[in-house]
Image (cartoon, rainbow, N blue to C red):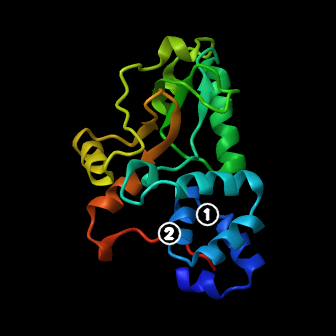
Amino acid sequence: QGDILANLPPERAAAILQEMEPDEIADLLARLPEERSEELLRLMKPEESEDVQELLEYEADTAGGLMTTDYVALNQTSTVAEALESVRSNIRENDIRQGYIYCVADATQDECQMLGSVSLWELLIANPAQTLQEVMETDVPTVLPEADAHDVAETMAKYNLLAMPVVSAEGTLEGVVTIDDAIDVLLPPERRRRPSRMY
């Protein structure tokens, strides 16, 4: 896929990238010459290219290099009903499909302080009027961006986790490592999941 991207017209290549997950885009761009990678980033929508540039700052074999920035983070004061509507909206508009909502101190800030998480199952059975603070799990396993990707994947497999939040030393939610990406780390290269088709 890197070879295809390298040879397509820049505008077409950028359009294809924008249909992919940020972590998949970062993986592909990391394999391209720096000049070509920067050209494609310039042609992408600013909000999407910013997410990808953040991911490119991390080494590929770390939690930061493995994580995605596509997740749902809501203020802990949001109600269950509001959270479910946000999930529906994110699936419709952004195709974000994850098993957890992440509860933060202030979702309007660029730097969200991670407080806990709520599974979709828990949201579905909770009272719609309850706040996320009332239903969230606060003892959530997290990992630093610099953590070894293989260690993260093994921990997720050991505890049967669908996702693991990546949190800075200051407690800021940076991204999420999903189970499909974790499994890819544990599999031999020839058995790893391929990124979405580009054509």
Q: Earlier in the sequence, mark 2 or mark 1?
A: 1
In percent of width and height, residue 189 lies at 31, 73
Q: Which three-letter amino acid code belongs to the residue tagged 2? A: Pro
Q: Residues within 10 Å of mark 1 (few under 14, many from 20)?
A: some
The image quarter containing residue 167 is top left
Q: Answer whether labels 2 and 1 touch (C-beta < 8 Å).
A: yes
Q: Residue furthest left?
A: 158
* Image quadrant containing the C terminus: bottom right
Position of 43 relative to 106 (above/below): below
- Please give the name of the residue rendered at 31% of the width and 46% of the height, measured from the top-left corner: 152
Q: Which residue is mark 2?
A: 195
Q: Residues within 10 Å of mark 2 (few under 14, many from 20)?
A: some
Q: Secondary structure at mark 2?
A: loop
* Distance from the alpha carbon under mark 2 to that under mark 1: 8 Å
Residue 141 visible, this angle: yes
Along the horizontal axis of the image, is 106 left or right of 144? right
